[in-house]
Amino acid sequence: METTFPRLLLQHAAQRPAAAAMREKEYGIWQSLSWQAMAQMVEQLACGLHQAGLARGEHIVVVGTNRPRLYATMLAAQSLGAIPIPLYQDAVAAECVFPINNADVRFAFAEDQEQVDKLLEVRSQCPQLVALWYDDPRGLRNYSEPGLSSVDALLEQGRRFAAAQPGFFRAEVEKASPDDVAAMFFTSGTTGNAKGVVHTHRTLLDRAEAGARFDKLTDKEEVLAYLPPAWIGQNIFSYAQWLACGYIVNCPESAATVMIDLKEIGPTYYFAPPRIFEGLLTTVMIRMEDASAVKRKLFQAFMDLARRVGPALMDHKPVSAWDRLKYAIGNIAVYAPLRNNLGFSRVRVAYTAGEAIGPDLFSFYRSIGINLKQLYGSTETAVFVCLQPDDQARSDTVGVPISGVEIRVADNGEILVRSPGLLKEYYKNPQATAEVLTADGWYHTSDAGFLDAHGHLKIIDRVKDVGRIVGGANDGAMFAPKYVENKLKFFPYIKEVVAYGDKRDRVCVMINIDFDAVGNWAERRNLPYSGYTDLAQKPEVYALIADCVEKVNADLASDALLAGSQISRFLILHKELDADDGELTRTNKVRRGFIADKYQVLVDALYGGKNEQYVETQVRFEDGRTGSVSATLKIADTRTFAPVKAAA
């Protein structure tokens, strides 16, 4: 696309100045911001940042939740030829040091007091950070830090400058080229320091346009922006595609009100990782278990029909007139109210990505009339590599390559991608860039997979994580930890899993239960518990999880390639894995190596044949304080099954 983000903003402002560009919920009321008002705000911010000394090619950090002023600050920086770097708002202060120093950041936008405190805390380690602007002034009245000022003050300075030099802003916007750097996103850093992924206006907008064409997106779409702006998925859906299509982006009041806001807005285009869809379904099932017997029976009967008929209707396959009639009745009685309760009444396209989604979960949403699909991509590919057509959505693939994308499978099973959306480079890291980008433009994804007979891509695991069982009855068998972990996470009672087995004689796993789902299960059985740690070690809970593990083992036994990955032993952890404790990335991916080191005593106990093991762990609370959690964890053996031989 031969344009830039600021030019697209001005184009929308010129063509439909009064149309809503964004909405923000504040004090329970939705406030609309027109394209003209957004363009005016961006001009004033750009003029203010210019006066503050932000130069072309320089970086500026933005940290906070989705807010119109955060997006406007990014656009303002891009208008001056500067490069915004969104950081995760839930990251601890120490995690901000590397990106700020790596990118020589002098200026930062912080949403509120929490983010200001975080940046002030690391200022001694980042002496070049001279100016911080905050959006929400609550709690900041008595702060007198040098260089700390409000966005309101920056806007006022910019307003005066724009009035004195009315042609400055547009002249700066016109200086930009589509091949100029538009933004930098720091990867989650599962091993070592994060890497700054550099993207141009062209790479981001090309993929935004390709995705929009694939799903026929228009300016009539409504999107709810509730995931971290630092995650490129949210950035593409609520920033790049927002400007490419001109639809409305809605910013919820807070993380606590997202479900309410989802129902009020009724988005037409929706994205969420599997854990969000899992959480929504768990909430529905918990409520149904508490309903009357008549309602439960009615719900079950219509859901049985939906599972049989719904996906076929979504895929435009033949369905008998009698089943269509029954489904229509079910739609009035159950499916439509359920979609409305979930906030999905108007959803035309819904995507999930980042992790595998369970077949039952995937089928549930499609069976009640929600067009849920999977996509494949990464930060380095500007998200869109493979998408699923509306009538070809399957839980075991991630779709077909979309326009401009070529896919090749290397000899070791690694997926290679060539696309107009590939990163320009890793910032200040030519060695890492050379490792992933070939001279002829192929990107090494590090994912293992293959294209099936229908041209759909299937992902097995990370190439580096695919290992082998060594010794024992399954000597030499393939071990795909992510595949095993995802199969267990398909159960509503299991939230996280860490699997080990590479270069070992068997597979063992550590499990986090889903506290809400298991808690509700326990309460209905009058099983008392005092908290997560107590509930996790109940014999009844171990029996519940053992049943899930054995079902996965039976399923693995039917796969000749992965039958050796069956789970021999498991334990339930005494605490939930947490990004603040370094156990998960900020995108909630398990840091398997870190966890193995941190819980070495548990790994040794699993493989040493022990039946229980005492462990004490330091934890970090939300307010920054630290404490410890200790428990004696039970270790359970599970039943494994002989591999099922394929029929001759």
Image (tube, rainbow, N blue to C red):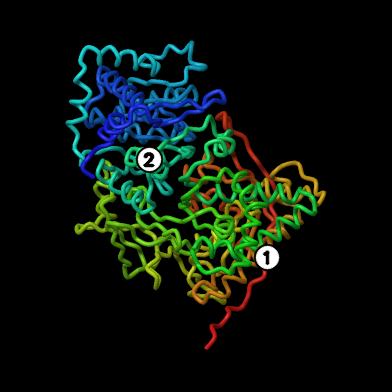
Q: In this picture, is 323 found above or below 381?
A: below
**In front here: 625 or 562?**
562
Q: Which residue is mark 2?
A: 219
Label 1: how many residues lie within 10 Å, few (<14), some (14-19) or many (20+)?
some
Tell me residue 292's x, y (percent): 79, 50
Judge from the rendering whether residue 622 lies leftward or rightward of residue 51; answer left or right: right
At label 2, the amino acid type is Asp
Outermost residue on the bottom side: it is 648
- Splitting the image into 4 quarters, where does residue 296 fall? bottom right
**In front here: 97 or 612?**
97
Q: Which residue is mark 1?
A: 637
> What residue lies at 60% left-to-right and 47% top-to-bottom?
280
The CA distance from mark 2 to mark 1 is 55 Å
**Numbered tag placed on residue 469 in the rendering:** none
> What residue lies at 56% left-to-right and 68% top-to-bottom?
319
**In front here: 138 or 101?**
138
Q: In this picture, is 182 found above or below 397?
A: above
